[in-house]
Amino acid sequence: MSGNLKHSTSMSSLASMDKGNSNEDITLSSLHSQFSRKPSANMVLGTNGLSSANSVDDKARNRRPVGDKIDLTRTKSDQERPEEDDRRSRGQAKAKRKRKRNMITANLTGTRYEVIRQMVEHVGFSISRDDDPAAFLIWNDTFVSSERISDLKPYQRINHFAGMGEVTRKDSLARNMMKMAKASPDEYNFCPRTWILPADFNAIQNYMKDLKAHKKNKTFIIKPSNGAQGHGISLCRNIDKIPTTENFIVQEYMDKPLLLDGYKFDLRIYVLVSSCDPLRLFLFNDGLVRMSTEKYLPPAENNISHLYMHLTNYSVNKHNEFYEKGTSMDSGSKRSIKSLNEHLRRNDYDVSLLWRNISDMIVKTMIVSEPHILHAYRMCRPGASPCSDSVCFEVLGFDVMIDRKMRPWLLEINRSPSFGTDEKIDFDIKSALIEDTLRLLNIKMSDKKKNMNAQKMEAQKRLFRPTKRAGEDVNMSEYERQRASIERRKDELKELLQRVKKAGVREEYENRNRGRFIRIFPTDDKARQERYIHLLETAFTTFMAGRAPSMHKEIQLSYNNKLKESDILDMIAECEVDEQQGRMALIDGKRGPARGPKPLVSMPSSDVVPSTDKEDEDMEEMSESISPPGSPYRNAIVNRSRPGSVNSRVSNRTGSVLSRPNSGVNQGQGQLGRPVSGTAGPGSRSRQAGGQKFTHIHKSNVDDSFLTNIIREREDELTKRTLQALNDMRIKFPGKSDQEADIILDKLYENWKFHKPRIASYWLVKLDSIKRRKVIDIVRSNVRAVLQRTWRVPDVDNLPIYRVFSRVFNRLLWSHGQGLWNCFATSGNSASWETIFSKSTDAIDENELNCCRRIVQLCKDCLLIVYQFAAEAKTASQGGTERDIDPPPTQRSDSKLSLVPPNTQTMSQRYSKLYARTEALS
């Protein structure tokens, strides 16, 4: 056998032996048994028995053994093959390391949950072995310090927000909810009554005394302020058993919960906060139903210590011998929310209404946390762009309980909900939650490179930024100041454009990749969004009163921006045109001896017959005029006419070009008065027609005050017409004439002492904030229509006079309708709404003030008509006689506000339809 084997330095040569030798059957197992005597050396079989590979190589190099034939070619290839294998393995290892460098890395050293690791690998991320601070994704089960958030790069993501403890700690949640309940009691009434010990010990003692005085007995649940997983929770019915020196919260126990198969249960609802600047919330469409393990009985002295009956925490009930692990989503002591929804539908419950209330509750809760989270986030990330991606996100677990009336109640919020997968239902729901969360974060490999490029550009921008010397503004010329103002405006518009673009891209990505998430804020429901914006403003006023005014503007910009991308581009183009006009004016001023503002050109001659419309008598033609920047009357005065324009016409008598400033939108301008290509630019002169020559007013030293006076006179006249239209406006009672409606109002005012408490109860108590706003909106919508008709502008939001009216409307809704109710007082408080102008720097003339007074009177009359109409409708539905008490609104004929007549529908349906039918004045 030894004579047939060749010298070899590898096991591969053994397989290439002479195939002609079929008598010997050599197997790898037999060779392994032979060579396993010296496992530390690479043994081969030679002519002299077993020897090491190194010794065989030395012999083969120095001398040829006798009787041995050596194939030099095969030996050389056999020696080179391990080197090729090593090079190949090194190349594969290098390629693998390169692939890892090009993969999104995740630092999961801070989490103990295996399902997170599985889902991270499932979406294509690479898990780093060590605590990598530069990983794209960082996931921790515990609190993350502000310093760590500050050290993150813009491309990184971490799964906690700083400041979230304001709603996840039980005592902080109760404290913040009580503050918001004082500001908005109608909105924040979904938390059980709570006391924070030891601070509120006297308050709860007084509450217990009141209960004893009324011979009532209630059960309280005691929880540690910063506890979790049911530790330290107990029930009591005696105040003496409550500890007074430790940090606890005491809540009223919900003794009438909705039961499932006779067991008490609560819901674990998962919510993703993907950003706080701006706030974006997503509700996962499934969750866990956690049930107790003993049949529920109302709390009594004999069962108050049965925690398996009264608590629904999984960490508590899993130790009970009756805990049942389910085999499906709708069985066992832990079930899915989808199965609960099906159960409720089978029992004729309104599931859609329930989840609208739950999502509304979640949004309101996060609105409470937004001032704290936003402040902490901006402190951690100073200088971050408003349109940049958030480096923080968080998955929260809301614990919600439902009572027998299908009303949801918020129990607590978990900032680190358990992702343990003890059962199959846990893995199915939580794995889907984590997967959709990771996809919705939109983490990309290119973000790192973009971040590096952005940092370089920002460094260059700071390096080449011109230094501003002290007193430089004083020595600036008028042109330089105007140019600097235009540049600032352009920068603001470009930043706004970038924000709008970013928001559009983000929303499009979320709609395509949200998976099983539902976005609940911002919402597409305009009425609900307006309500949330109002609550946001209230939250910032409550928790950050010093910064509330500036934050209110930012809230409107972030959540209620009505400008589209094309509108912003038009505004930037307008700034560029203004800048070019200023440059041309400077050049023209250097050429001529006189430097001054641009003069009017080609005023109409005296033989021009004026238009029959009174609104055209003031200005018939201004081929070139410039109004002060931001003036809403610029569209009505500036005329950049072009041939064929509908607002440019040639008089048959004189052939002059006449402009109707109030006859609609100029064809030479955009909808908002922006210049359009093809319009006549500055310096255009009036044309000649029929061989006639016209009187021209060439560029001369016309003072700015001349043009300003013309604009002011125009404004005053339009304001007077607005006041006249408002004075002609009446509140029309359905089915009655104007005289009868006036008689009804006169009777209400004459018998004011009798009607005052009833109207106060109706306006301040019976109507909620939405219905109160709808009553005011009746007058608001018709005032808007009057302004559109009088001022001849399609969008009145930019009119200064409408901004004044809006402040009045907001003041009337102030303090849950107290602003309008104060106007009914006979003392000095009747003009309390006028104080909003005394504290403002904006001047308001007498005509505008009279318009505001008329609007207040219309709102008062509207409330009285609504009150009386509702009273008569209620009396008619009950089959009684009519009484002067109350009504709801809408509809109008001509310039009069009117109400829809009652019908045979239910009151709730009638109210909804009546409030929805407000129309604009023709």
Image (cartoon, helix red, strand yellow):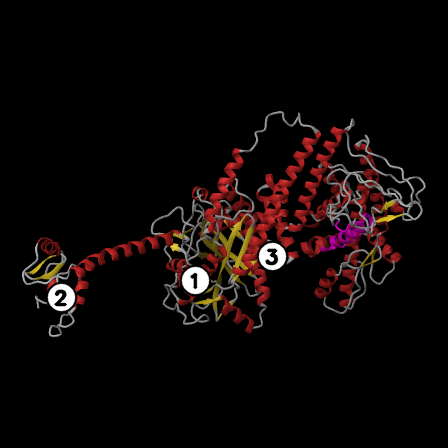
Left/right placement of residue 648 relative to residue 478 reads right
Residue occupied by mark 2: 31
Q: Is residue 801 above or below residue 484?
A: below
For discs 1 and 2, the disc positioned in front in the rendered view: 2
Residue at x-position 13% and y-position 66%: 31
Left/right placement of residue 776 relative to residue 416 reads right
Label 2 crowding class (10 Å Cα cut-off): few <14, some 14-19, many 20+?
some
Dominant secondary structure of the residues highlighted in magenta in the image:
helix
Cα–Cα gap, marks 2 and 3:
75 Å
Cα–Cα gap, marks 1 and 3:
26 Å
- Give SS at disc 1: helix
Residue occupied by mark 3: 523
Q: Nearer the viewer, residue 116 or 73?
A: 73
Res 763 → quadrant: bottom right
Quarter of the picture containing the C terminus is bottom right
Looking at marks 1 and 2 on the same chain, the residue that comes earlier in the sequence is marked by: 2
The percent position of residue 522, horizontal first and vertical second, equals 59, 54
Q: Which mark is residue 908?
A: none
What segment carries the magenta color?
774-795
Q: Amino acid at mark 2?
A: Leu
Q: Amino acid at mark 1?
A: Ser
The percent position of residue 393, horizontal first and vertical second, equals 48, 51
Residue occupied by mark 1: 431
Label 1 crowding class (10 Å Cα cut-off): few <14, some 14-19, many 20+?
some
The percent position of residue 222, horizontal first and vertical second, equals 46, 54
Q: Nearer the viewer, residue 198 or 83?
A: 83
- Give SS at disc 2: helix
